[in-house]
Amino acid sequence: MNILILGSGGREHALAWKLKQSSKLNQLFVAPGNAGTAEIARNIAVSVEDFDGIKKAVLEHSINMLLVGPEVPLVKGIHDFFEKDAELSEVMVIGPAAEGAMLEGSKEYAKEFMKRHGIPTAAYQSFGASELQEAYNFLETLSPPYVLKADGLAAGKGVLILQDLQEAREALREMLVDAKFGKASARVVIEEFLSGIELSCFVLTDGEHYKILPTAKDYKRIGEGDTGLNTGGMGAVSPVPFASEAFMKKVEDRIIIPTVNGLKEEGIPYVGFIFIGLIKVGDDPFVIEYNVRMGDPETEVVIPRLESDLLDLLVAAARGNLDQAELKIKKEACTTVVMVSGGYPEGYKKGYPISGLENIEGSVVFHAGTAHDREKGTLSNGGRVLAVTSFGKDFKQALGRSYSNLEKIDFTDAYFRKDIGFDL
Ligand code: AMP
Ligand code: GLY
């Protein structure tokens, strides 16, 4: 089987690394990929939003399966594009069609879906620009902190949490009237603040059956102690120690089953991953958000823990017989720590040579923002540059391994958090 993975981050490198272990894999391609994926697969210089370019690559390389990493091509309808094209309709696509991708593409759509299916989530109301006064009135019925969410995709930046009512009113006006997040904030969801600890749960579904993948916790803030600006993710741990069997039973019964059944009942076909952002309030799970893809850096700890062949699972999902596939999970804990460029998530420089990658022992380095240069070797090429993943008998041992290997890697202004897992 020939597979094309769309994307260029640590998530896609980790997916490529796992698929390479399958005896059923013939050729593996990644578009556009990074220096890490180039070592184990063939990179194709096509953007994830260039559907015609992707079609050309699929036909040229006789691709049998398209595995979509990021959300943007899904929300823009890459699955539908494949289905409608006579030359592509036989290709298996892992990732939902545009309708299912709305679970991530519109927060209002996701909240309405949860409401229809009785899935626990924060109470909310949503408003458009012509309803500013109504939105102010609703804010006044809530107590701080105030949670404001741009309805559409905003590259992870569209959620604001504000302590002060006046500030919240101002931010709301900026979102709705001044288009603070462009079209994404043409509508805003205002919701009740939930207080608890967050974790992520990953499900693979064929639209009828599902498999629950390992849980993970990611660390989104740039600074130690979860301070400073939000990032794509600075590290992750799997499994999540506080996600007990009893808690996961509640997640399955109250959230996963109603989600998969809800999609089915509404006639929304869905083949792919559902990433459910959860918050544990007391002993009960609530949904913070849905994503229609795997997480990054969560993939770098979830996928290595699969004992089973990922290719078999993806084929079963595409063919609708996921119930017959086997999912075995490794007992060991897995952690990853992300090395970023100085300045990230604000301005940063690219193009610094990365040294020490050849000295790594007992960890796997997944590349995120890297590029290969014939003369200079591996260069930094993004905000998040590398994710250093390790196994251990528990997360502490695994983190010890990630950290001792991180000490061996260097590039100008490299930074990583030294406290991943501090709250567990
Ligand atoms: P999201 O982009 O939806 O994941 O939201 C970003 C972050 O905002 C989440 O990871 C939470 O930390 C926080 N958040 C979102 N919604 C709520 C809520 N209702 N209560 C408390 N925190 C929230
Ligand atoms: N790490 C969070 C995400 O992938 O959205």
Image: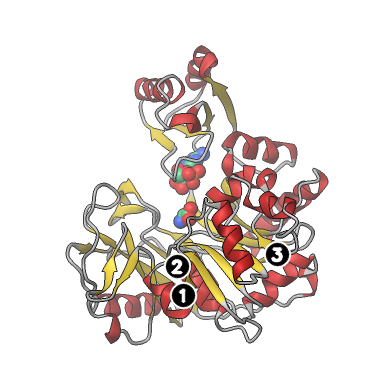
User: Mark 3 or mark 2: which comes first in sequence?
Assistant: 3
The residue indicated by pointer 3 is 92
User: Can see residue 213?
Assistant: no
Out of 75 and 31, give the one closest to the viewer: 31
Residue that numbered label 2 is attached to? 237
Residue at left 49%, top 30%? 183
Residue 355 seen: yes
Q: Quadrant of the C terminus?
A: bottom left
Asked if labels 2 and 1 touch by Cβ distance under 8 angstroms, the answer is yes
Element under disc 3: strand
Q: What amino acid is at disc 2?
A: Val
Q: Callout 1, which amino acid?
A: Cys
State the SS at label 1: strand
- Residue 257 badge: none
Report the side of 46 relative to 359 (left or right).
Answer: right
Q: Nearer the viewer, residue 418 or 38?
A: 38
- Could you say where residue 268 lies in the image, as x and y percent from the top left? 76, 47
The residue drawn where x is 79% and y is 65% is 320
- x, y (%) of residue 90? 75, 63
Q: Which residue is mark 1?
A: 334
